[in-house]
Structures are given as C-alpha cells and as structure tokens.
Amino acid sequence: MSVDPFADPAPTTATNENTTVKPPWDEAAVPASTNGEVSVTLKGGSGYDAPWIVIKAPTVQAAREALDDENSLKALIDKTAAVGAYFSAKGGGTPRPPKPATGSQPQGKPPYQQPPGGEQRYCRHAAELGPMVWRSGISNAGKPYAGWYCPSRDRSDQCRPQYPTK
C-alpha cells in the first residue's frame, strides 16, 4: 500500500471553505512588537536528519495554548513525520556512514583516569573559577593525553595546561 505523504488528512468534521483558521491566542491582546518572541521546537529524533516542528508564539501562555490544541498538533506531527519519511527515502535525510577506524586508533572510549594521587592544581583563575580541571583520554591523532586544564571558557585567556611529571 502506498501512502501519499502530501495528501491532506481525512477531515474529522465538516468545514466551510470560507472559514479562516485563527491562532489559539487573542491576537488583539498581543502588541505587534512582541510577535514571535517564544518558540517551541519539537524534534522527531536525535539526528540532524530527523524532522523538526517549530511553533512560534508571542507569549509563553500562547505557546502553551498552541500545544494544548491536541487535534491540530497531532495532525501536524503526523503530516511532518510522513513528509520527513518520504524525504529521507529519497536521500534527503540519509545519515553519513561512520568513518572506518584506523589501525592506530583504539576502539571505544578509554576509561576515565583519576589525577595522580588525587592531586589538584590551581591557576590564576582559581579564586574566581576554582581548581584546574583534570582531563584524560585519546586525542584525535590517536595519542593518549592527561593533564590539568584551565577552567576559563575564554580560550584567549586560558592558562597553559599542566601535565603530571613521570
């Protein structure tokens, strides 16, 4: 059985062609300058190929009212899922295959290492941001690393990493 993802769903009630569909909030109560200040994003999966629905509303209450309109929201979700599946089947949402592992890189994530002797180190940001952060793992080049790193989020202001002595 073939399903047309672009077909309108069967009407559940009789409608008049001259009927204008209005948003579920009172448009007169919303100043024009606040239009679209709240958005709710519904994502159909975890990958970039999953379909999204973005609901924009002038207020949080209006967004809640739009989400409370179950029949319309379910119809929109069903339609979005059908069109998304159709598009993916045509190659529009095919995820990239994983990169093959090279011989030099170990498989899987290495176990977390504790700093030697539970040691903590401090940099010039310690009074403001706390002690340096211990990190260990395998680099993109396949080499192990371990050391203390500055907790500053500003890369131009970060202190140099400190590495354990052997």
Image (cartoon, helix red, strand yellow):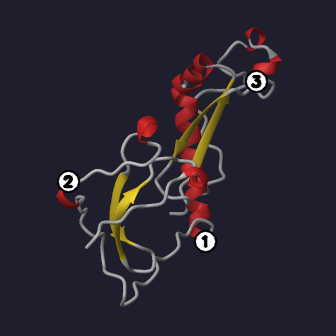
Looking at the image, tell me whether mark 2 or mark 3 is earlier in sequence order: 3
* Residue at 31 percent of width and 81 percent of height: 106
Please state the horizontal and vertical placement of residue 134, each as a whole percent of the image.
Answer: 33, 56
Q: Are marks 2 and 1 in contact (CB under 8 Å)?
A: no
Residue linked to disc 3:
35
> What residue is shown at x 39% (from left), y 80% (from top)?
142
**Label 3: few (<14), some (14–19) or many (≥20) C-alpha neighbours in 10 Å:** few
- Above or below for 58 versus 120: above
Residue occupying the far bottom of the picture = 103
Residue shown at 62% from the left, 63% from the top: 87
Front residue of this view, candidates 145 and 161: 161
Say left or right for 163 vs 32.
left
Residue at label 1? 91
Q: Residues within 10 Å of mark 1 (few under 14, many from 20)?
A: few
Establish if 111 lies above or below 159: below
CA–CA distance in space, label 2 to label 3: 54 Å
- In the picture of the structure, the residue carrying the numbered disc 2 is 118
